[in-house]
Amino acid sequence: MRRDITLSAFCRRPAFKQGSKNVVGRRRPTTGATPVQSQVSRGEGTCENTARRYTEHQINCCSRVSVGRAAVVVTDARPRRQRRGFAPASRDQGPESAGTRRNAVAAAESARTRDRSRTEQDKMSRNRNRGDITMRIAIAGATGNIGSRTVAVLEQAGHEVVRISRSLGVDLITGNGLDAALTGVEAVLDATSYEAADREDAVASFGASTRNLLAAERRAGVRHHVLLSIVGIDRIEGGNAHYAGKREQERLVAEGPVPWTIVPVTQFHDFAATVTDWTEHDGVAEIPPLLVQPIAPDDVAGILAEITTSAPQGRYRDVAGPEPQDLVDMARRSNDARGHAVKLVPTWASLLGPEMAGDVLLPGDGARIAATTFDQWLTHAH
């Protein structure tokens, strides 16, 4: 069995008798010497007191240790029989000396742990930049508009994606199949959406699914939960039932047991056509005159994939498209592009009320702006 010996390195040179030499195994110092000492053999200056830990094997094999430009000479005051035969040194050194050694050992071990952690993080960062590291990631809402696009981005990057959807046999509302789906998963992206009859129903649905998902993540040891949310809903109490459900999601995630990132995103480029389909009746569709700054769904998927494979960041900055748009005009142009004839009626009496007017749904300062404009998306989508 090997014993660890702590060297108190880089200190003032000890007091030696005149004529003594700083060579291992030579004359013993008469005062100021501990069983194992080291000395920096350069100049008269002092060096920063630090501690190093060597095994007796290392001490036996190496008497000089080169540190930078300084040559550290190990002076061992024990008899040669003890040094070579690993005979135990005397323990009668007092409580203060023992405590000092323990503190030095603890300090050295802590330093080595920090160095190893930093080295591993740097290596992972370099490998991730080269594409060498892949993750096992679960996507809740994997068959939806954003979820399916994010799955494609992650798989193209080489990650293993677990699809979570009721149609695929995993029910977030009841929790059935969640534990099996999250086995070995490192990060989860929640891109779910629910159609609700009223605010209470929306809060109940989003709340149940989020609680079940977070609880299963905690059991599985998931290290990062990412929630796709909506810009502006944290700044108001109004809005439709969907917004109320998303606010409940944000609250549960922020108070939950899993490290998290909430990503607030503006409305998508296809939002105007979606609102038209929601409200259309007998050839007439009621559209709230919202001011929005829409973003392309593919841009959202790319940003979500990037964030999900990164460390948790808390509330992420707002994510938006490059240009503000009027929702009614977006609906008209979208319907024209897809050849859908419908009469549009601007009103606050349909999905959203006047509390959503103005810049409520626009991104805040420091937002992350994606590149694809509404016109570019419209040209390629139709």
Image (cartoon, rainbow, N blue to C red):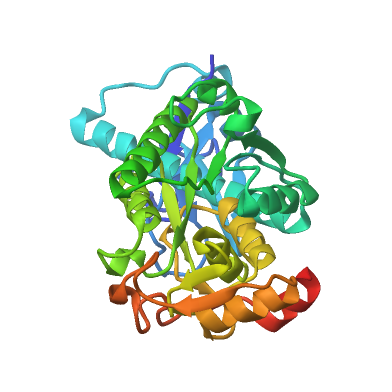
Farthest residue in the left direction? 95
- At x 49% / y 40%, what residue is drawn? 223
Q: Residue at x 75, y 72 (%)?
A: 339
**Residue 101: x and y, percent?**
33, 36
How far across and down, in percent of the image, does residue 5 sit?
A: 45, 31
Q: Which residue is more in the foreground, 26 or 296?
A: 296
Query: Does the rendering let one see residue 117?
Result: yes
- The C terminus appears in which quarter of the rendering? bottom right
Image side of residue 275 versus residue 202, left or right: right
Direction front: furthest residue = 282
Please tell me which residue is depicted at 32% across the width and 39% down the height of the picture: 204
Tell which of 147 and 338 is nearer to you. Answer: 338
Camera-side residue: 113 or 58? 113
Q: Is residue 207 above or below residue 282?
A: above
Q: Is residue 267 visible?
A: no
Can you give x and y, in whole percent of width and height, for residue 85 in the image? 56, 17
Classify 260 as above or below 101: below
